Amino acid sequence: MSDAKRTDWIDALSKLLIPIALFAVGSYFTIKKNEADIANQQFQRESEILKLTASSNETDKAIGLRMIQLLQEKGERIPDILRPVVSVVADGRPSDPSAQKARLIQATETKQSQPTATSTTSPSSSLQSTIYLQIAREEQRSVATELQARLRQAGFSVQGIELVKNPTLNTYVRYFASSDKGQADRTLDIMKEMKFAVQEQDLSRSNEYKNSAGQLEVWIGEKHGPSSQQ
């Protein structure tokens, strides 16, 4: 092959390969840019959900939790960035709507990750219940602190004392699963020993609290406290 023909062949091949190479490089960077755009959009979405769910505004929190539920309904797993805030919200008292929704999210994720797993043992059958303690007035904090100490001595896990905006009139021990009645009875006995005028409320028949096994609420009402202070 003469040098002229070789040069013509190389020139033709170059003209053919250069557009292909440019197309390949362009496609690569387009794909990478699209991947980066998708990752950025996902990060922005997750950050917005995180901001809403962690909000002290109950409406914002409800919107954030609902957005997480929508992700689950589409078959997506909870992003790692959202797990801690869902866990914190789920630790709220059983009658708190946000806590109920967060526990439902956790239960759904467990079911999705272990579709064949079954359990016949109630969480509260072998463990002490967690107690959420509410007071109606700041003046009740001292007696609530004493009650908290006695319940902990009895082996219960007692959360912090919460001054609620919408207290009950009377004093109650509430349980949300039939398996927790024994623990509620024990709590009731401790409170009666402290001279509380207290009643027991069974909320176990409500589907609203189906993920609240192993949890009790103690409400020191507006009207009641230890009889010595009435």
Image: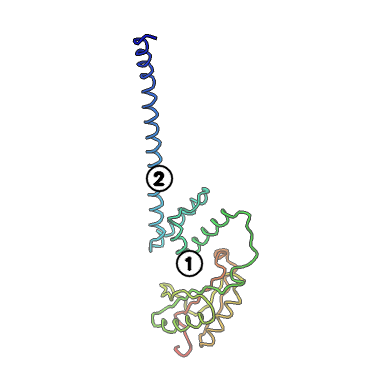
Q: Residue at x 38, y 19 (%)?
A: 16
Q: Quadrant of the N terminus?
A: top left
Q: Sequence-wise, which precedes: disc 1 or disc 2? A: 2
Q: Position of residue 58 (x, y in %)?
A: 41, 62
Give the side of residue 142 with respect to residue 121, left or right: left
> What residue type is disc 1 on?
Asp
Quadrant of the rendered image containing residue 80: bottom left
The residue nearer to you, when weighing 41 against 184, is 41
Q: Is residue 99 above or below residue 155?
A: above
Q: Nearer the viewer, mark 1 or mark 2?
A: 2
Residue drawn at the location 41% of the way across and 40% of the way down: 35
Left/right of residue 25 with respect to residue 115 in the rendered view: left
Which of these two is toward me, 97 or 118? Answer: 118
Residue 145: give x, y in percent of width and height: 44, 82
Whole-angstrom CA distance, mark 1 to mark 2, is: 31 Å
In this view, the residue in front, 139 or 161, is: 161
Residue 14, image quadrant: top left
The residue under label 2 is: 39
Of helix, strand and loop, which one carries label 1? Answer: loop
| Residue at the spot of label 1 | 91
Q: SS at mark 2?
A: helix
